[in-house]
Image: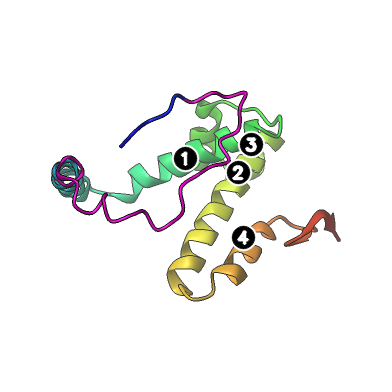
Amino acid sequence: MVRTQFDRNNPFNDLPHLPPSGEIDNDSDILRKLVSSSRALASVNINVMRLPNPYMLVNTIALQEAKTSTEIENIFTTEDELYKAVSDNKSEEKADLAVKEVLRYREALWAGFHALKETRNEYLKSTVSTVNFSPNQEYNFRNTTPTG
C-alpha cells in the first residue's frame, strides 16, 4: 500500500472508494494488528468493568468532548468549574452561563446516544432530534439558519 504525504494546503479529493478493495482483507500486517488491538480492547473492557461505576469514565470523556466542542463557539470554561457543577458541591442552577452551555451539550450527546441505541433504524430522525435539543431553535437538513 503506497502512502502519500499529507499537504494541508492541497485538498485530497481523490479518496479511494468504499468499501475498500479485497487486498486489505488478506493483508497479514493488518490482520496481526487487528488481533493485537482486539486483545488490548478486551483488556481495557475487563479493567473498566472492575470500576465501581464504569460510566464514570465515559461521563468524563463526554464532558471533555462537550467542553472542547463549545470552545469552537467561543464558550470557555475550566474543567474544575464543570466538575464542580456536576458534583454535589455546586448545583447546575448556580453555575455560570458557559458551564450551563457545556452541560447542555453533554446532555445532547447522551440524548443522541440513547436515541441511536433505541432506534437503530431511524438514524436521520435521531440526528435531527439531537441537533434540535437546543431550546427555542429548530434545525433541519439543508437549512443552516435556525427557526423559532
- Quickly name the residue at label 1: 87
Q: Nearer the viewer, residue 91 or 98?
A: 98
- Quickly name the residue at label 4: 130
Most common secondary structure along the magenta stretch = loop
**Vertical position of residue 41 compared to residue 68: above or below:** below
Q: Are marks 1 and 2 in contact (CB under 8 Å)?
A: no
Disc 4, SS: helix
Q: Which of the 4 image quarters holds residue 25?
A: bottom left
- Which three-letter amino acid code belongs to the residue tagged 1? Ser
- Residue 86 in magenta? no
Residue at (65% x, 42% y) in the render: 100
Q: Label for residue 70?
A: 3
Disc 2, SS: helix
Nearest to the eye among marks 2 and 3: give it. 3
- Quickly name the residue at label 2: 92
Residue 82 x %, y %: 54, 34
Range of residues picked out in magenta: 6-31
Using the numbered discs, state the Cα–Cα distance from disc 2 to disc 3 in whole angstroms.
17 Å
- Which three-letter amino acid code belongs to the residue tagged 3? Thr
- Residue 29 in magenta? yes
Mark 4 or mark 3: which comes first in sequence?
3
